[in-house]
Amino acid sequence: MRSKPTSSEYIKQVLSDIRDDTSSPWSTFPCLIWPRYKEPTGYGKAWVNGKLCKVHRVAYEFAFGAIPENMDVCHRCDNPGCFRPNHLFCGTAKDNVHDCMEKGRDRKVIGERHHFAKLNSDSVRDIRSNRFPGMSQEAIGLRLGVSQAVISCVIHFKTWRHVII
């Protein structure tokens, strides 16, 4: 009975089995998803040479060589579990953030784009412009379907800081 290959052997085997045409766009090839341990953030992790490593970085090194110092290995596909070499590229942390924002996939969702938002930019401007004269924060909150604490945070710029009057 053959034993299960180590993570390093498995990665090398999978990468040697795929034949990506480098002249074709990366998006024509499906993601290769790491089937073993993943972090809660979705990144594949594996023990390689006695060290716990992110699989996409190991795959990049197997395919292209050493990762330059101070560089990240970024995903074109934005799938943290993917380790297909032609879906990966080297970039700085700034490049990675720019790529993420350019694709509209930045994880910090603010304002009305947040799925729990009960207010919108216009209601925040109304609150800050005192368009509810004589009303208490509690009354404004009741009218807008939020708590008094939410109204206070809006007024004092603890939340919705990106909205200017």
Image (spheres, rainbow, N blue to C red):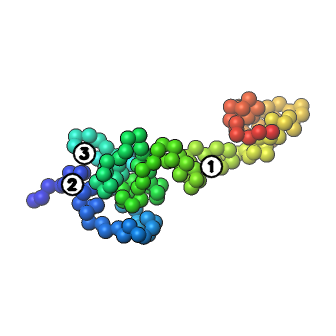
Give whichever of discs 1 and 2 has the lower sequence position. 2
Is residue 38 visible in this depiction of the protein?
A: no
- Residue indicated by mark 3: 48
**Numbered-mark total:** 3
Contact between labelled residues 3 and 1, with CB atoms less than 8 Å apart: no
> For residue 149, which quarter of the picture?
top right
Residue 88 image point, x, y percent: 41, 55
- Residue indicated by mark 1: 115
Disc number lying in front (1 or 3):
3
The image quadrant where one finds the N terminus is bottom left
Dot 2 alpha-carbon crowd within 10 angstroms: few under 14, some 14 to 19, many 20 or more: few
> Residue 145, relative to residue 103: is it above or below?
above
The residue lying at 46 percent from left, 58 percent from top is: 77
Gap between marks 2 and 3 measured at Cα: 9 Å
Q: Is residue 85 left or right of residue 4?
A: right
Q: Secondary structure at mark 1?
A: loop
- Residue indicated by mark 2: 9
Q: Amino acid at mark 3?
A: Val
Gap between marks 1 and 3 measured at Cα: 39 Å
The image quadrant where one finds the C terminus is top right
Residue 135 image point, x, y percent: 86, 33
Gap between marks 1 and 2 measured at Cα: 42 Å
Contact between labelled residues 3 and 2, with CB atoms less than 8 Å apart: no
Q: Amino acid at mark 1?
A: His
The residue lying at 24 percent from left, 51 percent from top is: 7
Q: Amino acid at mark 2?
A: Glu
Residue 132 image point, x, y percent: 87, 37
Q: Is residue 136 left or right of residue 62?
A: right
Tell which residue pokes out farthest to the right in this image: 133
The residue lying at 31 percent from left, 48 percent from top is: 66
Dot 1 alpha-carbon crowd within 10 angstroms: few under 14, some 14 to 19, many 20 or more: few
